[in-house]
Image: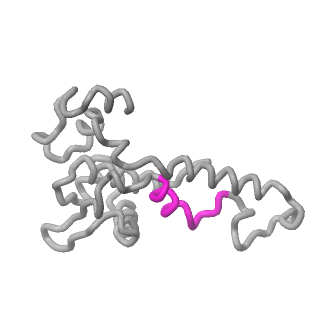
């Protein structure tokens, strides 16, 4: 299984927002931070906004931020949102032209496997990816003064769980 670039960019964009929680994030800053094309990122940001993951603000001082806390954003739901319209295999496509479609028994197994993949990501929250992650802060914090101090702010238990 291979995820699309859009899904990858969506998760990275949400991570930038989560690392900068009190900031209106600009598309150009995210593009620089995650090494992405602004044009491609614009489509992802639009879909993240439409799906309620981020809140967008238009205008000169516009940008976007998380629409809800990172602890309430499931990685599985992000992946489902961006991968849902792409069939994993021809069997799952409405225009399936496979000559085996009426007798093949593999498609039900593949469907279960894909669902198991998403189900394994459903309990993973965005906060688990960013909290107590000094390395990520160092890369994605837009304000250098706000970057995490290595070893700061996290309990030993939180660092072990990460």
- Give the quadrant of the C terminus: top left
Q: Is residue 153 left or right of residue 90?
A: left
* Image location of residue 114, percent across then percent down: 64, 53
- Which residue is drawn at the image coordinates 24% and 39% (left, top)? 137
Question: In this rendering, would 16 be left or right of 81?
Answer: left
Q: Which of the 4 quarters of the picture holds residue 98?
A: bottom right
Q: Is residue 148 left or right of residue 85?
A: left
Name the colouring of the figure: one colour
Q: In the rendering, at what x and y percent does residue 43 appear?
A: 39, 66
**Residue lying farthest to the left in this orientation:** 145
Q: Residue at x 21, y 64 (%)?
A: 63
Residue sitting nearer the eye, 15 or 6: 15
Q: How many marks?
A: 0
Residue 35: percent from the left, percent from the top?
A: 34, 47
> Residue 106's x, y, as percent?
80, 54
Stretch of the chain drawn in magenta:
76-88
- Which residue is at a point 21% across and 70% down the rendered structure image? 57
- Return the residue nearer the eye: 5 or 101: 101
Q: Is residue 22 above or below residue 62?
A: above
Which residue is drawn at the image coordinates 21% and 52% (left, top)? 21
In depth, the one of 6 and 110 nearer the eye is 110
**Does the magenta run of residues contain 80?**
yes
- In the rendered structure, does residue 82 fall within the stretch colored magenta? yes
Q: In the rendered image of this protein, does residue 150 appear above or below residue 119? A: above
* Main SS class of the magenta portion in the image: helix
Q: Residue 72 falls in which quadrant of the image?
A: bottom left
């Amino acid at each position: 299984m291979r995820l699309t670039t859009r899904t990858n960019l969506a998760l990275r964009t949400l991570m930038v927002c989560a690392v900068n929680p009190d900031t209106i994030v600009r598309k150009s800053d995210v593009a620089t931070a995650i090494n992405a094309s602004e044009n491609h990122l614009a489509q992802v940001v639009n879909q993240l906004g439409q799906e309620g993951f981020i809140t967008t603000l238009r205008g000169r001082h516009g940008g976007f931020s998380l629409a809800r806390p990172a602890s309430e954003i499931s990685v599985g739901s992000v992946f489902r949102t961006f991968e849902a319209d792409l069939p994993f295999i021809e069997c799952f496509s409405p225009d399936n032209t496979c000559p085996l479609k009426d007798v093949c028994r593999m498609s039900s197994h593949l469907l279960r496997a894909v669902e198991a993949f998403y189900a394994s990501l459903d309990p993973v929250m965005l906060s688990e990816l960013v909290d107590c992650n000094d390395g990520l802060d160092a890369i994605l914090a837009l304000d250098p003064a706000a970057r995490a101090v290595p070893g700061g702010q996290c309990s030993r238990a939180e660092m072990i769980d990460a």
